[in-house]
Amino acid sequence: MRQPIELEHLVVKFHNLWANQWLLLTCGDFEKKDYNAMTVGWGSLGTMWGRPFAQVVVRPQRYTFEFMNRYDTFTLCVFPLAYHKALNLLGTKSGRQTDKIKESGLTPIPSSTIAAPSFAEAELILECQKIYWQDMDPSHFMAPYIAKLYNQDYHRIYFGEIKAAFGEDQYRT
């Protein structure tokens, strides 16, 4: 059962979380029923400017990009591996043409401290307030393999201060 987690007691296997378990990035406003979600496998969690933060990247052609630019909050939700099929759908279909959230079978719920929705099925929820963004600059890539991941569609980088965390026991010390 999900319970509030004080951020100094939050524990994640960060690389496994992003690379294998994936996260669901959702931004918008739950009450206005104006939001979108996409599965993300690249990002980070840590400390920036003395605050706990989550960093996510979104390509400009993604529908979620519009919501990230329009709204100030987002959530990152982690699900049990049994939900990988739903996360795959949310990461490959666009919300422009279809209600992919409804099709996924996941249940949006209000977050506790921000406007962006969370999901009932999540085992970990991070509620974030945007604090910074910047467009990725390919002239700064220092490793050759990075450029091979792009075709002139560079991500926008967003930092969100983590305002609240809710999770099951495995995410708590």
Image: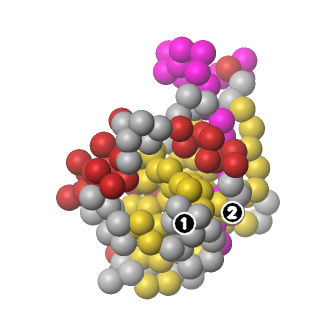
> In the visual, does 44 lie left or right of 98?
right
Given residues 72 and 144, the one toward you in this image is 72
Is residue 143 depicted above or below 3 in this figure?
Answer: above
> In the visual, does 118 lie left or right of 19?
right
Residue 54: give x, y in percent of width and height: 60, 56
Image disc number at residue 129: 2
Instruction: Please indicate, yes or no, whether residue 141 appears anywhere in the rendered image.
Output: yes
Farthest left residue in view: 82
- Circles 1 and 2, Cβ within 8 Å, touching? The answer is no
- For the record, the magenta segment spans 139-163
> What residue is shown at x 50% (from left), y 15% (from top)?
148
Is residue 147 depicted above or below 36 in this figure?
Answer: above
**From the image, which quarter does the C terminus lie in?**
bottom left
Q: Tell me which corner region of the image, top left, top right, bottom left or bottom right, holds residue 34.
A: bottom right
**From the image, which quarter does the N terminus lie in?**
bottom left
Task: Inspect the image, locate mark 1, and give the three-letter code of the amino acid beneath it.
Answer: Phe
Image disc number at residue 20: none
Kind of element beneath mark 2: strand
The residue at which mark 1 appears reads as 30
Residue 28: give x, y in percent of width and height: 59, 57
Asked if the stretch drawn in magenta spans residue 108, the answer is no
Task: Inspect the image, locate mark 2, and give the three-letter code of the amino acid beneath it.
Answer: Gln
